[in-house]
Amino acid sequence: MSYREPLPEGCPPEAAEEIPAPREVFRLVRGNPPTLNDFKSQRAEKPEAVFKVSECQARGLSVFAERRDAEERALRLPRFRGCSICRVTLQDGAGRIQQTFQPSHHTWWPLAAFDILAHCGLQTV
Amino acid sequence: MKTIRHTTTLFYYDGPQVFEARDAIGGHYVGVMVEPQGGEDRYLVAGVAPERLRQFRAGTIDLRSLLTEAANEAWYLATAAAGLDQPLTLVPQDTGLTQSGLLPDAGFVLHDRPAEELALREARERNNLVLEIAADPPEAAEEHRIRVGTLVGLLGHVQLMVKHAYGAALRELSPDNRRAIDKTDAHLMDVVIPAAAGSFRVVMEAAKTPDMLGQSELARALQRLDVLFENAGNPQKALAKVKAHRGHLAGAYLRLLRFLVQHKTGLRYSWAEPGFAKSNNRAVTEAEAGPLVDMLSGVSNLGGESVTLVGACEKANRGTGAWGLLTADGVCSGKVKEGGPSLEGLKIGGNYKFSCIEEIEEVEGTGREQRTLYLIEHEPA
């Protein structure tokens, strides 16, 4: 079982859950249609950067469990001006996920074999 | 050049998007990520009044209002070249913030609804886990007052119970998970509002701020407390729950209940973390505490925990039953449990495995705990 990005030992953490049943999460994307560039971790974007979070977190993707948090919070921030929301349907084989930071925010570590774009549907805002 | 240091992340998405910071003299700032420059993260920063920051944390004002108001004085840009662990140098900006195009849109608030409950409101405003306890001893019936001994005892018992609940929660984690947690002082609480309005209420906050994921270690302990207090009105159900948490936590619970009975008071508590939609509330009335004490007092070894020690025998007094064992953690000493094994035949300097029950007793009137190890079995190691 290999992850989309090389992960440090002990990552994802034990508290991160498998995804046995389909569930939806929401991610901000710049591309229309979305591309794999929209699903790069912070570490993949900035290989040399020093992050405030652990290396494991830096190699995960931020997603929201509630669309409202993407639409009414993240999209209002200057950094995400012009972004759209992609609904990603996670299912068995998508990787592992853990609630982190604010309640709706989750960190997702996708498995390499999971076809992200095939499970991503652009939402009208 | 003025510099600030990141203190708390308020909104995270692929990195801290909105955060709090302090300058060298304690001034409060808010930073918001804007478009990066030269591949480095860049933040709009403005100094904010503590009261307005508190309102923003509570979800009662939006980010744009907070920044616009603050930027009447000055606003800055800061580049996080070395990450947010290092001080950020603030570069003052001359143009008006509203014309900069960097402001967030209106309507970004941290919470959907304002908190109606005190614990939740305080948790949000303090951005930390908050526990509110309320007692109703006889002296509080007419006015806002409580005996010193009652207040001191109550706080002490609650803190000890939280400590043992945290210890019990940690023991259920895997060794790897346990190692990854910074446990130092994680069970401690600080009183932040010593006498809140209403019946006699005290508000406490986790002594440690939440971890980098925004989670407080103390939540593990309070979830355990919730389980024990859940069935306070039903002693049979409560008994089953307490037996399932046999050990120091159950012992601390029983001591707290005895205290409530002695001081003729019930106890209500609420706790919340900043991200909660509502507080968790539990209560035990004075009338409920009595039958619980009676029932739990009849359970043998309710508060004892099994401890296994391996080491060299330092002392074995057959007359008094006192013993000492030099283990890797130092010398442990105790006595033989009533009806327990004889110390006859143990050799000083010989290596043994001692199976013991550790019991905690309260040192009368001090609120301190005294631990005693009772030997129930020994064998050569």
Image (spheres, rainbow, N blue to C red):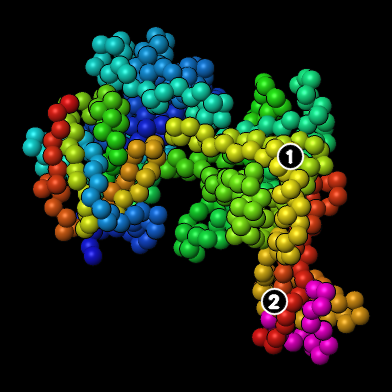
Q: Residues within 10 Å of mark 2 (few under 14, many from 20)?
A: some
Name the residue rendered at 68%, 58% in the picture.
Answer: B248
Chain where mark 2 sits: B
Task: Specify start and end residues of the magenta stretch as a single range.
Answer: B337-353
Mark nearer the viewer, 1 or 2: 1
Q: Would you say the residues marked 1 and 2 are in contact, meaning their CB atoms lie under 8 Å apart? A: no
Q: What secondary structure is the magenta-colored segment mainly?
A: loop
Q: Is residue B245 above or below residue B353?
A: above
Q: From the viewer's perspective, is B315 left or right of B94? A: right
Is B222 part of what is drawn in magenta?
no
Q: Earlier in the sequence, mark 1 or mark 2?
A: 1
Mark 1: amino acid: Ala
The image quadrant where one finds the C terminus of chain B is: bottom right
Q: Position of residue B167 (x, y in %)?
A: 61, 56
Name the residue rendered at 35%, 49% in the picture.
Answer: A98
Q: Which residue is mark 1?
A: B287
Q: Position of residue B337 (x, y in %)?
A: 80, 73
Name the foreground residue: B318 vs B134. Answer: B134
Name the foreground residue: A118 vs B327. Answer: A118
Q: For residue B355, which numbered disc appears in the image?
A: 2
Q: Residues within 10 Å of mark 1 (few under 14, many from 20)?
A: some
Is B350 part of what is drawn in magenta?
yes
Q: From the viewer's perspective, is B6 left or right of A27? A: right
Mark 2: amino acid: Ser
Chain where mark 1 sits: B
Q: Describe the element under mark 1 as helix, strand or loop.
A: helix
Q: For residue B209, which numbered disc appears in the image?
A: none
